[in-house]
Image (cartoon, rainbow, N blue to C red):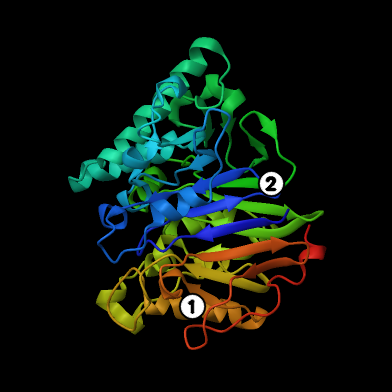
Amino acid sequence: MSAKTTHFKVGNGDMTLVVLDSGRSILIDCKITNDADDPDHEAADVGAQLRDRLARDAQGRLYIDAFLLTHPDQDHCAGLRRNFHLGTPGSWVKADDKILIKEMWSSPIVFRRTDRKNAKSGHTLCDDAKAWRDEARRRVRLFRAQGWLADGDRIQIFGEDVNGKTDDLLPILISAGSTFSTICGVTDGTFTGVLLAPMLADDDEEAEVLSKNNSSVIVRMTLAADGNATAGRFLFGGDAEVAIWERIRDEYTDADLTYDVLIAPHHCSWHSLSWDSWSDKREKAKVSDKARSALAQAASGALIISSSNSVLDDANDPPCIRAKREYEAILKPVRGPFRCVADEPGDDPLEIKVGYFGVKPSRVVAGVAGVLATGVGSEALAHG
């Protein structure tokens, strides 16, 4: 079978389902609002769309093989408690029919930086983020107690925590800069992930900057399809802003950052590309050359996706029209398209098929966006 990604229509938020060539599923963030669950509301029923794409296990439970939360903002974890089973697998209730998370992919340092940022701003974690944190802690405690985990209790830690807090978790720890291809204790040869961030700060000053700058898990995921091991490279950056991308540019090579599909970070926000405020400076705002370079490693025919509201020529940020123009400029030399999920027809999500010859977005009606008749990333066979 081929691989596929589904990018749900959630407005300014993120929710992406990755189905590997092996059939295993990975959910990256979720935003299932009360409006989305209300059949009388015009919002797309993304919860039902997700459920329709999932399989059931031998016990009749809908499940996700792995669920990555890039960071604990509400627009990345809304609906977690209503739609996903939290707690021991044995406590799953048929009448509730919630989705079982076989393995969590979670970052304690991202939570720590978010707590630090919230303490200064007076904000607090939303209830869904607290529920994720508590479930992650339950699974880590279980691993520490017995040294192994089963499906429904599994967790992989993305990025080291400070002061050696994750030193005893090496079997379930993925360090920044390392590659991984394990899901639920099994090596899956149909994908390879590279964890680009979060990275530990070099000093207290940098730690303060990174805490302020929407620290997120950043991962470049390479999907295999139909026998081609590098059929499609996807770069997911959560809400990471300019300081993070400047650090990424310093730490990694062009090859590490090359993508066929980029999910524009922070819902096409200008803050991922610049230290300046778009609403304050408008066209006088300056691009960070280093951050732009980190986000500009587009392969031939690459696609950039904005998981956001429609990008309009106004003062909003996110999404920001100036950021869209920068991404379009990045794509121009490689002849790739920019797509906004909000502009997909009806309530349908944007789907991208990954086959032997590369990635191919779903078609859209004329007048909404260009119809793509050929695969994106025609150089897929040369990836390395």
What amino acid is found at the position of numbered circle 1 in the picture? Glu
Q: Are marks 2 and 1 in contact (CB under 8 Å)?
A: no
| Position of residue 258 in the picture relative to residue 380 (left or right) | left
Q: Quadrant of residue 56?
A: top right
Q: Secondary structure at mark 2?
A: strand
Q: How many marks?
A: 2
- Give the Cα distance between marks 2 and 1: 29 Å
Q: Which residue has dot 2 on it?
A: 192
For the view shown, which residue lies furthest in the bottom direction? 367
Res 381 quadrant in image: bottom right
Residue that protrudes farthest toward the top in the picture? 145
Give the percent coordinates (x, y) of residue 229: 78, 53
- 329, 49: nearer the viewer: 49
Asked whether residue 291 is in view, the answer is yes
Check disc 2: other Cα within 10 Å, few if <14, some if 14-19, many if 20+: many
* Residue bearing the label numbered 1: 326
Does 370 appear above or below 43?
Answer: below
Percent position of residue 197, x then y: 52, 46
Query: Which residue is located at x 68 percent, y 72 percent?
Result: 376
